[in-house]
Amino acid sequence: MALHKILKIVALLLGVVGVIFLAMIIAKGDEAVSATGEGVDGFLYVAYITFAITIVFVLFFVLKGIFAGNLKNTLISVGAFLLIVVIAYLLADGNPMPMQEGEMLSASGSKWVGTGLYAFYILAILAVGSMVFSGIKKVTK
């Protein structure tokens, strides 16, 4: 229970500090902030601290859950995900492409963007398929 109280206090403090920095940004005005970026640093530091705390706790509880649960099933799931990423990587083409800023996206960068898209499509199809299968199975029972 002590950890819960400490986390509530830290969250409250980060929220208050974030609101203070937001008020400072609003007080400076749009022109000053967009021209010089003045006042944004503190707001970003609060976001970085919040993000770091979140990442630490997520990693801690994920690792705790992995070792407390069935390690074999976890490794099978991770392996299946890696297999999907490998399949997506093989499907993706690596053609250099022009970007909006006039620069060129490298072949490797293009291949990884394509990999991400294909992996998303494969996972989305699997998710929708599992929902449809579950619904059909439920209706037939």
Image (tube, helix red, strand yellow):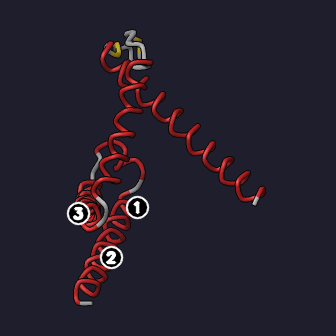
Mark 2 and mark 3: Cα distance apart in space: 36 Å
Q: Which quadrant: the N terminus?
A: bottom left
- Please name the residue shown 24% across and 54% down the image: 41
Dot 3: what SS?
helix
Q: Residues within 10 Å of mark 2 (few under 14, many from 20)?
A: few
Res. 42 in view: no
- The mark nearer the N terminus, 1 or 3, is 1
Residue 26, relative to residue 134: is it above or below? below
From the image, tell me which residue sits under label 2. Answer: 16
- The mark nearer the N terminus, 2 or 3, is 2
Residue 1, relative to residue 29: is it above or below? below
Q: Residues within 10 Å of mark 3 (few under 14, many from 20)?
A: few
- Please name the residue shown 32% across and 76% down the image: 16
Measuring from the top left, give residue 7's x and y in whole percent.
27, 79
Q: Residues within 10 Å of mark 1 (few under 14, many from 20)?
A: few
- The mark nearer the N terminus, 1 or 2, is 2
**Residue contact between numbered discs 1 and 3, judged by CB atoms under 8 Å:** no
Query: Which label sits on residue 26?
Result: 1
Query: Which label sits on residue 141?
Result: none
From the image, tell me which residue sits under label 3. Answer: 67
Measuring from the top left, give residue 126's x and y in whole percent.
56, 40
Res. 127 in view: yes
Find the residue positioned furthest to the right.
Answer: 140
